[in-house]
Image: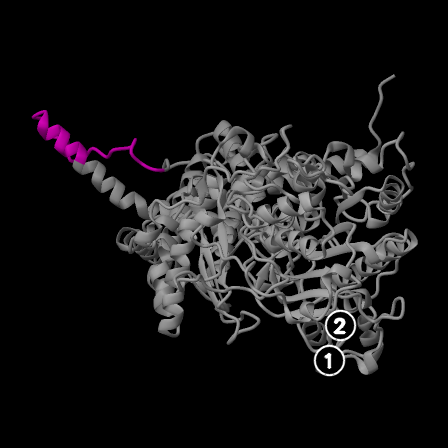
Amino acid sequence: MESRLPSSLVALAQTLLGVASRLLTRQFIFAVACVAILSAKLLHIYAHLDALQLHTVFGWGWSFFFQDTVVLLLLRLLLDQGIFATCIAFCISALLLLMGSGSTAFYITAGTELRWKNMKAIHDPSAFKMLATGIFMLLVVMAVLFVVSMVLQSVCFVVADTCIDVLRVPVNALYRLARKGFAKWRGKELPEEEEPKSYLLLSQDHDDDSDDFAYDLETNSAGSSQQTPPSASALMICLRLLVGFGMALQVLCTMFRPPDSSLVFLSWTLPLMPIVHLMVGATLSTVVALPVTFQHITALAPPIAFSWLPDKPHAGFEDWYNNKPHYSAEKDPLELSNLDQELLPELQKIDLGDVPIKHVMLMKLESTRKDVFPLKKNAGVWDRLASTFKNNTIPPKIEQQIASLTPMARYLTGDLENGFANGSHNLERNGRTFRGGISAQNAHTTATYTLKSLLGTHCGIVPLVADFNIEYTQHIYQPCLPHIFDAFNDLKCGNESNQGASNWTSKYMQSTTLGYDNQDLLMPKLGFSEDNIIGGEYLKEEGHKFPPKNISDVNYYGMPEIAIEDYLRDAFATAKKTGDRLFLSHLTSTSHHDFSLPEDEKMVDLAGNKDWDMLSRYLNSIGYVDRWLGKILDILDEQGVADETLIIFVGDHGLSIAEDNSFTPYHNPKISNFHVPLVVSHPSLPRINLTEPVTSLQILPTVLDLLLETQTLTPCEATAARELLRNYEGQSLLRSQKTISDDNKHLGWQFTIMNPGGSSLAVRDANHPELRLIVPLMAGSEWRFTDLAEDSYEKEAVLSFDFNTLVRRLDNQVQQAWVKKAVQMAEWWVEENRKRYRFKP
């Protein structure tokens, strides 16, 4: 019996066929390509507009679109070459739509332009979940481009055909001249009445049916490219004149524009951008010549002899065992040591020998900017929240909710002046309103990419100047804290014994995946044994000490921090049983985008309108992490180790979410991405408010210095720690910071790698911490200078693609001289950085 389709399916098929007949036409295919390319170009220009001067835009702006015009005209010609060529054009148009929508959606979501060379990161399985968060915006942008394409399809086709008609005049003339010249060379005359046919860019006659595509779909006559008759309307004549003028202007601007790298970069068309981003080279070495005293200088030298080094090779000390060149602080022209300085006045008032330190914790605070640790009234984030309400006033109920977000941060920093009435929501534990320790107010991270920042805090070095985590494949040029503690377990003390020493155990924990960007391979390189590394994958497996808990993922990287509670408690309980000393490192997770909370937590609206909902979610996640830090202190109290545990709290990077609604530091140069909390906390230390500019690479030297000053190391360990301490780049936070070399020649330069690592570098110096320079390491990025003393929110940043132009635009000679010196130091340092890692880009 013959089967029949239901009438509803037939109707649906007819509807889809009707829609397809309207969309899959040459007109629409071409319009999609036009809209995708031109929207991407306008976004490309807008993203870099602050780096351009108005006379540059008005003078040479037409040249920015020359490549786009060429690509689109070639695509238009392809559409007239039959069904197969039309299929190819369709694929090209679809690819352009995806690229244009993707770049626009990324800019709207992340607040910065997509760098196509970084798209290789999507091969990481963990990256797919991250990308999925932008799918909705991608679909929205794609839908908008579709609608615009439908509206403008006839206009795009007519303008393109007019361009081709205009080009036909010079092409035909050149063709005639070429034929006449060739005929004359052969001694023949070309008949005057002969009209060449084959040279035409488009054939004179088109069968409208040739526009059919996909099931012989019909198109209307607007899809043809028939010639306009001689009696063309005045409107068409005006259009041809206008188009001809525009094309001539494009050609002239392109031919005669200055050889400025910014003009070239802004001229690249969308389909070529992935190639451009892959092939652009470094620009730093061509800007300012190095001082003679820095030429051919390196801090690499034969390893310093360590008599205590264990006979058995230890990870992190390979250079000593293999006698390979190693970093030498003595040879480093930029290294400043403050170990000969007195302890800070507050520390001189106590006997550091009475400060017991058995365990050390390093708490990396995900996406935590300084002004939310703690969050204060009338400062930073508060101002942005206030701007979302009428009259810039936060309602009292919301104010109380904000005041209650970060009491633990106030307790840990001792920063109790929060601006809220009567010190509301200040915390008291064990009869104290602060834990004690050093709180740095002007600390910068070593990298605004999380995995790179781990090297700064664990190893006392600035990460490698290269995109993403490739340090695990390179030579990490200094021993990290786990390496040092492991070496303490096997010291060779000569005639002395390491009596009284307890073994050190180093453990690393996070509740999220270790699979992203090869973090699972990085952590062993930092000295953590694989048996002592806990991540999201392990927590979800069966068959280990604590069965997996039924905890849902809080973001696309994994579970909230509470998933490792049992493991934190067990780490200290085990150390108590064995008598071991514990170094425990932990990276928080909930304050990472998309700032969701665990299912049993309530999200509170803190912003006055939905435009700033992401900021509200971020602050809610910061509040959750604040409560988690309180839970950690509870565990330490419960295990009886709170008074003998040194804890370092430090942000991996910040976010400019309050400034531009951006949830990622990717290629984002704003100060809020760099400025992080840094607290060295111990209940027996006085409260110290450190205002000097420091960086997170100073954590390792500070830990060693504090272990020495508190006399908690054995004599043998103290000898090793003292000799190691003197060979690190960072200064100790226990002492006054040295800001200039003894010979007054070199300043205290501080470098931060900007996410993802290989394109830009942030530079400041400890003598002028208010001055910041973003140095582009690859073509296509801007130079950026800000003076925080005059512009604390960096609203008036000076940008330029050209260094000399940037210098000319600065306000005074002091700034100009500083910028030139900063570039010289950056040039030397970048090359030196790669030498230390033995990295060849």
Dot 2 crowding, Cα within 10 Å, few <14, some 14–19, many 20+: many
Q: Nearer the viewer, residue 80 or 105?
A: 105
Determine the residue positioned at 77% across, 54% down.
357
**Which residue in the structure is indicated by mark 2?**
608
Relative placement, left or right, of 822 versus 581 is left
* View extreme (left): residue: 187
Determine the residue positioned at 62% across, 65% down.
343
In the rendered structure, does residue 328 fall within the stretch colored magenta? no
Instruction: Indicate the secondary structure of the residue bearing disc 2.
Output: loop
Residue 309: x %, y % from top left: 61, 35
In the rendered structure, does residue 191 fall within the stretch colored magenta? yes
Relative placement, left or right, of 516 versus 6 is left
Q: CA distance from mark 1 to mark 2?
A: 8 Å
Q: Are marks 1 and 2 in contact (CB under 8 Å)?
A: yes
Task: Give the magenta part as a residue range.
Answer: 178-201
| Residue 390 numbered mark, or none | 1
Q: Earlier in the sequence, mark 1 or mark 2?
A: 1
| Quadrant of the frame with the N terminus | top right
Q: Can the viewer see residue 715 in this picture? A: yes
